[in-house]
């Protein structure tokens, strides 16, 4: 049976004063724990004990599609681990800022720093030969390969909250976002000047 990776949602409310993102949108003042459209979030990798965070940076994959690299990093303070929740690429209308999300919602995740979307497609990832995950598009505009479905550990229609354990399923290929402590960038597989040294490879499987 295929093993899926849990992710945990961490809304950045507690860090607003430190990071200075006064323009972030949350469901409303009385529902700070709820995750809504426009929320800035960090996703932690449960298998690694919540010690790695979904990350991207303005550099390209050295193989495969050559698109912007996505990894999991062991540092929650990095602004490169911030993602903005948006409506799906195929949605005819933008979602309303603060609109609450339920399990089963189809979304895009746009990287806060580079404005590219979490993306996947049937190309092999560089280390594990799973399905490649990258960041794609310009100014938040990409294609249907940017769409992900939020699946909760327990099937329900409740609103998403900070700390929720979820799966992200790629809408187009039905693969699940994942990573593994056993698949890490090192000097042996990435070189002595590896810019993502000790990052976990992020893939879909």
Image (spheres, helix red, strand yellow):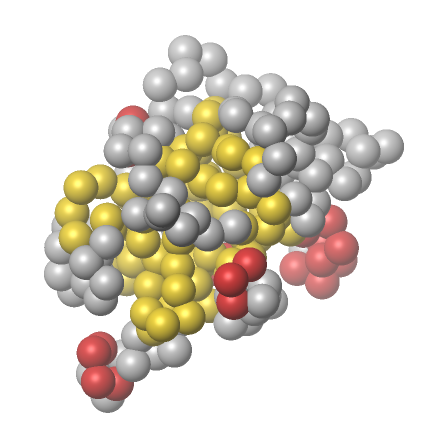
> Is residue 54 toward the left or the right of residue 58 in the image?
right
Residue farthest toward the top in the current orientation of the protein? 92
Q: Nearer the viewer, residue 2 or 106?
A: 2
Quadrant housing residue 158: top right
Q: Is residue 104 visible?
A: yes
Quadrant housing residue 102: top right
- Image coordinates for residue 174, horizontal then vertical, percent: 32, 33
Q: Is residue 66 visible?
A: no
- Image coordinates for residue 201, horizontal then vertical, percent: 33, 64
Name which residue lies at 46% across and 68% down: 73
Name which residue lies at 60% across and 20% down: 96
Q: Nearer the viewer, residue 1 or 163?
A: 1
Residue 85 vs 131, above or below: the answer is above
- Image coordinates for residue 18, horizontal then vertical, percent: 71, 62
Name which residue lies at 35% across and 57% down: 202
Residue 70 vs 41, above or below: the answer is below
Residue 196 vs 81, above or below: the answer is below
Residue farthest toward the right in the current orientation of the protein? 30
Name which residue lies at 29% across and 58% down: 69
> Is residue 58 toward the left or the right of residue 79 in the image?
left
């Amino acid at each position: 049976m295929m093993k899926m990776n849990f992710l945990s949602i961490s809304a950045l409310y507690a860090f607003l004063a430190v990071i200075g993102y006064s323009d972030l949108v949350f469901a409303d003042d009385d529902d700070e724990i709820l995750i809504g459209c426009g929320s800035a979030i960090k996703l932690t990798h449960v298998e690694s004990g919540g010690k790695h965070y979904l990350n991207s940076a303005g550099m390209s994959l050295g193989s495969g599609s050559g698109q912007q690299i996505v990894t999991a990093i062991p540092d929650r303070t990095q602004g490169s681990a911030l993602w903005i929740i948006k409506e799906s690429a195929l949605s005819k209308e933008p979602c309303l800022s603060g609109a609450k999300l339920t399990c089963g919602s189809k979304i895009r995740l746009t990287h806060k720093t580079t404005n590219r979307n979490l993306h996947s497609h049937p190309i092999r990832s560089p280390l594990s030969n799973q399905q490649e995950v990258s960041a794609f598009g310009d100014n938040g505009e990409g294609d249907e390969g940017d769409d992900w479905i939020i699946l909760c550990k327990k099937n329900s229609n409740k609103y998403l909250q900070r700390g929720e354990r979820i799966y992200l399923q790629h809408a187009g290929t039905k693969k699940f976002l994942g990573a593994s402590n056993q698949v890490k960038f090192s000097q042996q597989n990435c070189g002595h000047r590896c810019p993502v040294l000790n990052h976990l490879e992020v893939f879909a499987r």
